[in-house]
Image: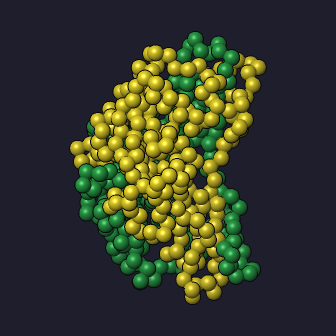
Chain colours: A green, B yellow
Amino acid sequence: MKDYPVTQRNKVKRLPKRGHYDRETVYGILDAGFLCHVGFVMEGQPFVIPTSYGRDGDKVYLHGSSKSRMLTQLEQGFPICLTVTHIDGLVLARSAFHHSINYRSAVLFGAAHLVEGEEKERALFLISENILKGRWDEVRGPNAQEMKATSVLRLDVETASAKIRTGPPGDDEEDYALPIWAGIVPVVQQYGPPVNDPLLTAGIPIPESIKML
Amino acid sequence: MKDYPVTQRNKVKRLPKRGHYDRETVYGILDAGFLCHVGFVMEGQPFVIPTSYGRDGDKVYLHGSSKSRMLTQLEQGFPICLTVTHIDGLVLARSAFHHSINYRSAVLFGAAHLVEGEEKERALFLISENILKGRWDEVRGPNAQEMKATSVLRLDVETASAKIRTGPPGDDEEDYALPIWAGIVPVVQQYGPPVNDPLLTAGIPIPESIKML
């Protein structure tokens, strides 16, 4: 796979050694999560809205109510920015200045368009699978009315970058002698034990999709 | 405390019952995290960049390198949007359509300005404390050169909203009879055990700030 083109739009300027432009790295960050923050502009005002997504190569799918302000705005093909961030740890240095966060973030640029028909159905499957693999086949699929009430957009990624920090703190040479603890506190997102719907019919077991989490 | 003014900019349009405009709710969401996504516009192109923050009432502080593209752009006072999102659980319904996410998000609007002097020092303290309370007093504070290399911006929040979903799935009446598991899978962000810096001087214990996590 080719790297994304590097332009003023996606170039990582601060700490360029943390920047990545290859698709494998960007895809890896997207595929490790299901929450993105979508940025768009209305009358000069930026909006940043959290939403879920699914991916198929350089196509990123978003969905929501057909009446959603975000979706009706985005489907007009205006430029958007879609960002996914994972926090991996607190980086605790000997000096306040060198404190940092270990993270992986992907920032994607492109425009979005409404999709219909088979692509819309597949996009909903991809979004669902990205949140909980296997769930789609366990549940009642969408009927015609639900499909109509749902809009799906495809973001065609024009370019993107990733920025990653890993590893221990980097302190100034003279600070290593200070009697101050330094290191990493890992941050992890985890799933708790499933909680039955209070209205669940007795005797229905936990499904495979959840067991695989 | 008064609610934020509700305008076209911050009104929660989809599922308005999930919308909140009171400061207590917005502050609570901000204070429960340390990662925000900042949206700004350059030549019509939106950018969404993850960063940490600290809060003092309706003032939200951001920091970074004095050379940061984001900060040099934001300090010009353009409109920005700052969003904080917490994922609390996967909401697994009997139908694909009623699947959802339990979440708390806060979306803030305003403009940012560079701060200096005492306010800058206090802002750095607030950002640090918001990431790891107590750490500031354990470490070597910033010297003049480090202060110069750091920019701090204050976002004066003009208005904001929160959107919250909690609780079990809501299925269509006729779907409750389906033999499909439904409920919640909680999602939690947790801290792992601290990892010493490989260059840590022997005998330095884990500090109080980490023990309090």
**Residue A199: x %, y % from top left:** 67, 79
Q: In this view, does A158 lie above or below B192?
A: below
**Residue A84: x %, y % from top left:** 46, 49
- The front one of A125 and B109 is B109
Q: How many labels does the image show?
A: 0
Q: Is residue A184 above or below residue A173?
A: below
Q: Could you say which quadrant of the image residue B59 lies in? A: top left
At horizontal 66% and vertical 69% (from top left) the residue drawn is A208
- The front one of A158 and B65 is B65
At horizontal 34% and vertical 60% (from top left) the residue drawn is B7
- The front one of A16 and B26 is B26
- The front one of B177 and A129 is B177
At horizontal 72% and vertical 74% (from top left) the residue drawn is A205
Q: In this view, does A64 lie above or below B209?
A: below
At horizontal 68% and vertical 28% (from top left) the residue drawn is B196
The quarter of the image holding the C terminus of chain A is: bottom right
| Residue B34 appears in the picture as rendered | yes
| Residue A23 appears in the picture as rendered | no
**Residue B197: x %, y % from top left:** 65, 26
**Residue B101: x %, y % from top left:** 54, 64
Q: On the picture, is A81 further left or further right than A43?
A: right
Q: Residue furthest front?
A: B1
